[in-house]
Amino acid sequence: MLKPGLRERSVTYDVAVIGGGPGGFPAALAAARNGARTILVERSAALGGAAASGLSILGFLDRSGNKALDGIPQEFMDRLAALGGAPGHFWCPVHNSISPVSSDLVKIVAMRMCREAGVDILFENELIGAEVDENARLKAVTVFGKLTNTRIEATQFIDATGDGDLAYLAGVPFTRGQEGTEIMQPSTLVFTVTGHDLEKLFAFLDERPEEMGIKEDYADGYDVDFLRRTRGHCFIGLTDLVREAREAGDFSVPRNQFIHIATASEKLLTINTSRVTRIDASDPVELSAGLETGYQQVLEIVEFMRKYVPGFENVVISQISPALGIRETRHFMGRTRLTMDRLYTEDTSRKAIAQSAYNVDIHSGTGEGIDLTVIEKPYGIPYDCLVPQEVDGLLLSGRTISVDSTVFASARVMGTCMAVAEAAGTAAAMALAASGEVRDIDIEELRARLVAQGAMIPA
């Protein structure tokens, strides 16, 4: 008779990627395609992270409407499009671009691409430990799932956990939240709805153009006609309706506007109006409390739509994201820390292995508003932003990279995270092939390889 008990297993790989979101699965793909035996560990039951929640992807076009990303990120979008899961990239006066996706097809396409590349995927496993040797080199991690501890030994690791859980366990120095205050941008529990009538909303906006919520000069052209002609759009507005509902006791969410975002299906809209403030989502108790708040907000927002928003009287929930959308927690320190004053220096561009074309978008962690600063042209992300201080055998990817909190508000979006991930996976495989450390790879050789793979980088 079998006896119950905690199981133990041990595996060895060339590259281990922890986290299967936009900062993770492209890294695993790139590593495997460059010859590394690769494992990808994901805490949930699906790859894709925030892209699997219903959110559109930002960052594919720059302010002028020019393409800013290619390589694996674009390949992923092309694979989605072939299944009807991505209608294209749409220029936006506010967000520079919106790229709608199907949340469910994201999960399937990301998994398929990894399988085709030979990546071993370990779903529903949570990181619980990291082993760093006396030479400050990360040697192994332990993950837990289904009553089993799995020890993963690897030559190179990539932290794509979003909150930097692996870097934290390994001892990489970090800061929290915004510079000087440690206030973190709020989290959001997004959800999708169906049963809406956008033309009825647009007719209301024709009569009440002041309810288009972005009035700043940079948003010239952001009007009802733009919404009508743009399949992939993000609507921000209804400030007066939100105020009216708040005064009537029908709206307590700490946000002054309503936001809906297009998906790959015209029958579905993602609602990005939830706002969970004053939590540190890297703390399990605060994260749990934030989810409770998010669920309460979802129902309140649905009731607000049905009662106040023209065209949304009959909406029903299609899906609630399985995870809280976390904008900001820890910021890790790398060999280089990119700051706003260095975005366009020659040194930054010369060492860049990815680029970002999204605006600086800071959601208030204590109030209702958003502070947006336009980024006129793409800037580069230097390789050393991926190389952490004090620990070898580890690369940072996605939103764990070493940037200040202002640059982070631009670089955190999914398109940029995917581009960074491709660079991280490629670099890990290159270091493996050279029997060296990721800190020592030839950046020019890495840049050349990324370009050969189709990636877009400055200069």
Image (tube, rainbow, N blue to C red):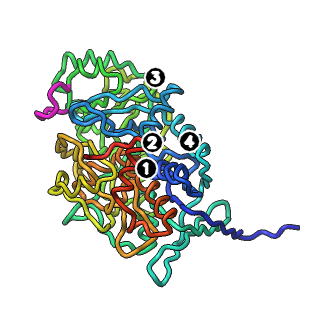
Which residue is nearer to you in this view: 341 or 35? Answer: 35
Q: Residues within 10 Å of mark 3 (few under 14, many from 20)?
A: few
Instruction: Name the amino acid, label 2.
Output: Ile
Which type of secondary structure does the marked residue at label 4 adopt? helix
- Whichever of callouts 4 and 3 sits on the residue coming sooner in the sequence is 4
Would you say 242 lies left or right of 21 here?
left
Residue 280 in the image: state x and y as whole percent: 35, 61
- Whichever of callouts 2 and 1 sits on the residue coming sooner in the sequence is 2
Q: Residue furthest right?
A: 1
In this rendering, which labeled residue sits more in front, label 4 or label 3?
A: 4
Residue 220 within the magenta-colored segment of the rendering: yes
Instruction: Name the amino acid, label 4.
Output: Met
**Helix, strand or loop: magenta stretch:** loop
Which residue is nearer to you in this view: 442 or 51? Answer: 442
Residue 258 seen in the figure: no
Residue located at (50% from left, 68% from top): 435
Residue 322 in the image: state x and y as whole percent: 50, 46
Instruction: Name the amino acid, label 1.
Output: Glu
Residue located at (30% from left, 50% from top): 411
Residue located at (40% from left, 33% from top): 270
Q: From which residue to which does the magenta span run?
A: 214-222
In this rendering, which labeled residue sits more in front, label 3 or label 2?
A: 2
